[in-house]
Image (cartoon, rainbow, N blue to C red):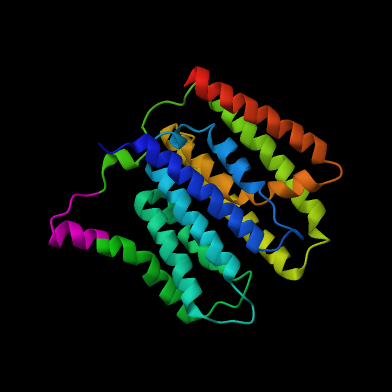
Amino acid sequence: MFNTNLCATLLVLINAIVLNRIFNKSNFFDRITYLVAPCYVVFISFFGISFTLNGVLIAHFFLILMIQQLFNLNQNETRISTVFNIMLLGGLASSVLPALLLMLPFMLGIVRFMRPLSFRDVIVGILASALPFFYHLSAIYLLGWPSLDVSLYPEKGLLRADWLVVLGVLFFASIIGFVAFISQWQKSAIRSKRQFQMLLVLFIVLLLISIFYMLSFQQISFFSLLLLPLCLLLPFAFRSETLGMASSGVFYLLLSFSVIKFFIFS
C-alpha cells in the first residue's frame, strides 16, 4: 500500500538537503554549514502538510529546484536554458498547486535582478511554464489519464486551533532572518546582494499569495512556502554577534516543542 506519511517524510528530508546544498554552493559563508536543513525540518514540522504527501509539499520541492536555478544565473551569461528551467519548475509547482500561477509573472522580474531580460526570454519563459499544463491536459484528453487526485491538495477546512502559534513562530523567524539580512547587506558581494534581493521579492510574493489563500480558504498551509527563502537567511542570524545567542536559544526551544508536539499531540 502507498504510504503517504513515509513519502512525506522522505520528501521533507530531500527538500532540507537540497536547500542546504543551495546555500553552501552560493558561498555565503567561508565554510560549509548545515544550519539550513535542520531549520527547514523544525519549522515545517509546525505545519500539518509535513505529515502527509500533498500538493504544497510537492510544490516545495519544485520551488527549491527553481531557487537553485535562480542562483545559477550569471550577469555575464545570456543562456536561455536557465530561464527555461526556472519557468518550467515554476510551472510544475503551479500544476500541483494552481494558486502559484499568480507567482509566475513575478519570476521573470526576479530574473531581471541578476541579468538583462530579453523578449526571447519572456516568450521562452511563458512557453516553459505552460508545458506542464499542456502535457497534463494532453494525457487527460488523449490517453484518458485521470486528473490530479484530490489528495494532492491540503485538506479543506477551518483553521486549526494552533494557527496563531504557527504564524507567530513564522513571524518571529522572519523578523530574525531579515534583521540578520540587513546587517549582512553592507558586507556582501554584489552577486550576493542580488541573490538576497531575489529572495526578498520571492518572500513578498509568496506572503501575499499566502494571505490571499488564508482569507479565501481559511488555510495556513501556504505560509509554509515562506520557509524556502527564509531558511536561506536564518543562518546569518546564528552567526550574528548580536542575534547569535538569541537565535540558538529560540531554535533549541522550537526543536524541543516540535519533538513534544510530534510524540504527544500528534
Residue depicted at 39% across the width and 48% down the height:
97
Instruction: Tell me where residue 196 sits by quadrant.
Output: bottom right
| 11 relative position to 44: left or right | left
The answer, for residue 181, to whether it is visible in the render is yes
In magenta, the rendered stretch is 136-147
Residue depicted at 44% across the width and 39% down the height:
9
Residue depicted at 46% across the width and 52% down the height:
61
The answer, for residue 197, to whether it is visible in the render is no
Magenta stretch encompasses residue 144: yes
Q: Residue furthest right?
A: 241
Seen from the viewer's position, the closer of residues 52 and 182 is: 52
Provide residue 212's location: percent of width, then percent of height: 48, 42
Q: Please say if 125 is above or below 79.
A: above
Residue depicted at 64% across the width and 57% down the height:
23
Q: Please say if 11 is above or below 136.
A: above
Instruction: Tell me where residue 142 sits by quadrant.
Output: bottom left
Provide residue 47's location: percent of width, then percent of height: 50, 33
